[in-house]
Amino acid sequence: MTGTSPTETVGTGGTGGGGGLSRRRLFGMGAAGAAVVGAGAVAARALTNETPVAHAASSADPYPFYGAHQAGIVTPAQDRLHFIAFDVITDDRAELAALLQDWTAAAARMTQGKDAGALGAVGGVPEAPPEDTGEAQGLPASGLTLTVGFGPSLFDHRFGLAAKKPAALADLPRFPGEALIPGISGGDLCVQACAHDPQVAVHAVRNLARIGFGKVSVRYSQLGFGRTSSTSRAQATPRNLMGFKDGTHNLKAEDTALVRDHVWAGPGDGPAWMAGGSYLVTRKIRMQIETWDRTSLAEQEAIFGRDKGEGAPLTGKKEFDTPDFARKAADGAPVIAADAHVRLAHPDNVGVHILRRGYNFVDGSDGLGRLDAGLFFMAYQRDPRRQFTPLQLALSRSDALNEYIKHVSSGLFACPPGVQDAGDYWGRALLA
Amino acid sequence: MRPSSAPVLIAVAAAFGLLATACSSTGAGSGGAAGGSTGGTAASAPAKPDKIAVAATDTECKVDLNQLPAGTSTFAITNNGSKVTEFYVYATGDRVMGEVENIVPGLTREVVVELPAGTYETACKPGMVGKGIRGPLTVTGSHQPLTKDAALADATASYKRYVQSQSDALLQKTQEFVDAVKAGDIDKAKALFPVARTYWERIEPVAEIFGDLDPAIDARENDVEPGQEWTGYHRIEKDLWVEKDISKDGELADKLMTDVNTIVSKANSAELSPVQLANGAKELLDEVATGKITGEEDRYSHTDLWDFDANLQGSKASVQALRPVLQDRAPDLVTTLDEKFAAAESALSAHQKGDGWQLHTELSKDDLKKLSDAINALAEPISKIAAVIAQ
């Protein structure tokens, strides 16, 4: 970690770059302006200066853009996702650096509820296309965070970055049972946009893509709804499309020591430019929800190793009860089966913590009378070689859930540390 | 029929096993006696009207007698045709009362069937596809209705007979396939591949109970971890259709035969619960929905519809084994199941081609959607069976 560590406070709102009015001030207080004090509105409990837990006062408010780490990782998971991966189509390193500067400036504004550029959607000359696409006019910041990552392919011959490639960014191995579609996997760059309002997330991604025309080409993008993870103790564990609470033991922002040890790349871990960053693994997991839905409750619960209502392990009563993996039923078989999801994924068994930040998706239908639905899994970690890879190997070998899911895309990205201030930009330490 | 459902299902099976044992000593001359310890068709039972000759050709199925007294009867089927055939005795809803598989041209094979009074159908299936050539069969005489528990025991015994007959044919056809591979006869091996798999796919949920062997026999290429050896039907399928070279597949073929032998002996000694039968019927249709409709199962040979048909038949066999119990407890469900099975079979039969099926690559997206819809329509009532059985 380099430089200063700005104190992140509740709903500062003023840390965005440049001048200009916020979209909301421009249009007056809309309905969304009424402060909603919900589960996410607990006052910040900054346990250390390094990893403060930023909680917006309302779901309309902004999160600070500048900081030691990028927002959108330990930030309490917002409700909506728009994820996008790009191929860089310029071979010019300076042009790539310029793009990242432009993106950073636009992100600093948009995350604070402002237009992508100072002139905004309607403030420019009539003969020019607007600087902002305009669909977020009147909408508040909605907790928007924008998080950037660099894929392994960015470190090929094109930009002379091979020597700076972190060892932790080595391609993931092939996992048994996966059926990856190349067109929706990989990518040189990615942006994760999360917000409470899908229109705000889509607006941000669209404007970054627009700024990137000619320099980057959209490789794939993914919309997500219904966060499937809690990243803060102030949040309840949500449910996936199988109807189960999954990720009960996810890393939470408040677990500061665990977050330090398992989420952030340390100064000695690899190249200096990644210190304070984190590695993102994305997996699009198609669920066979139709066959799942005609599976008996008993079998569904046996597969997860949890009950479906409370989310308690089959050996307990409450969601956060510690599973008793040794307990046997009267017939001698373990109560939580050998191939139950909770057994194979539980940190106590695999010794691996990751910070999951996935979303449900329904991408329409598949032409065979079925919904194209599942989980867009995203997880942040310090080193995928020691975290995601062994965990996924164990799951792909024996998880009972495999009969109902299929991994169809994969992405791996090095997300650099946070942008310090208006003079800094995403990846400056890598590209400058 | 996944092993991890064991905590629930084994408990049912164990409780049920006691009941089945208790009842079989007083069992009312049911098929229950044919299952269990004697294993397979009740070969020791005496035949009353000596033997009933069945003359099968490619177009006819002549059964000597179509009126029989209740009890055990022996059918002797001679295949005078040019295609491999099968012979079935069906109760209402195509519940298999007795069957013999894989009767090659020129051969006579016998099957002993225990039939309570009632009306049945005989069927020969030249080429092993379709509904077969049907004929009526009436059985008269005293018939005591089964008690509830005996009816469940009868269901599992009946399904055990099915597994036995399918696994016999599986061994035989896999051996022929393996021999063709080892002889380097690519054309013969290609022709046998979907046929041998038919028997596998009919009883796969039973095989899946033995999780460690199922991948060795039936894994697709992407199921295998890097560094692990890929073996089984699909590995040889790729060599046959893509590499067009099976000269080095001798060991693979031998291993397949060994693994199939092992799994068959395990499958035939497995004690199944009625709930497992119900779940197996559902899982076979899940297999169709996720693997066959999409063409992922036989991605090199594109013979997915053979597997589709086999899954459907296997599902029907386990559902029909439970039929008398369902008829008693949920007659409306039986009516729905009959309708939906007929609709699924009809949707599939549109793609029959000669003695086999169209290739997956010959089907349009619209064809596939119709098949998918028919399977989903059938799987829904099938998913309700387990709860009825567990009552």
Image (cartoon, coloured by chain):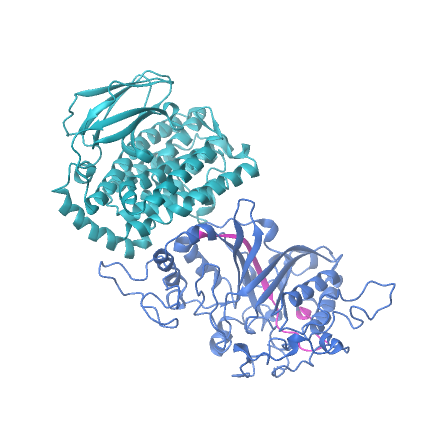
Where is residue A22, by image quadrant? Answer: bottom right
Q: Residue at x 36, y 49 (%)?
A: B384
Q: x and y percent of residue A77 in the render?
A: 55, 71
Asked if B356 appears above or below B146 in the picture, the reply is: above
Classify the position of the C terminus of chain A by image quarter: bottom right
Task: Residue A209: tell me if it is visible.
Answer: yes
Q: Which residue is drawn at 67% across and 73% down?
A: A111
Q: Which residue is drawn at 76% across and 56% down?
A: A214
Chain coloured blue here? A
Asked if B22 appears above or below A125 in the picture, the reply is: above
Whether residue B25 sits left or right of residue A279 in the image: it is left
Q: Find the magenta span and give its range.
A: A404-429
Where is residue B174, by image quadrant? Answer: top left
Q: x and y percent of residue A19 in the render?
A: 77, 78
**Chain B, chosen colour in render:** cyan
Q: Nearer the viewer, residue A284 or B338?
A: B338
Where is residue A121, by image quadrant? Answer: bottom right
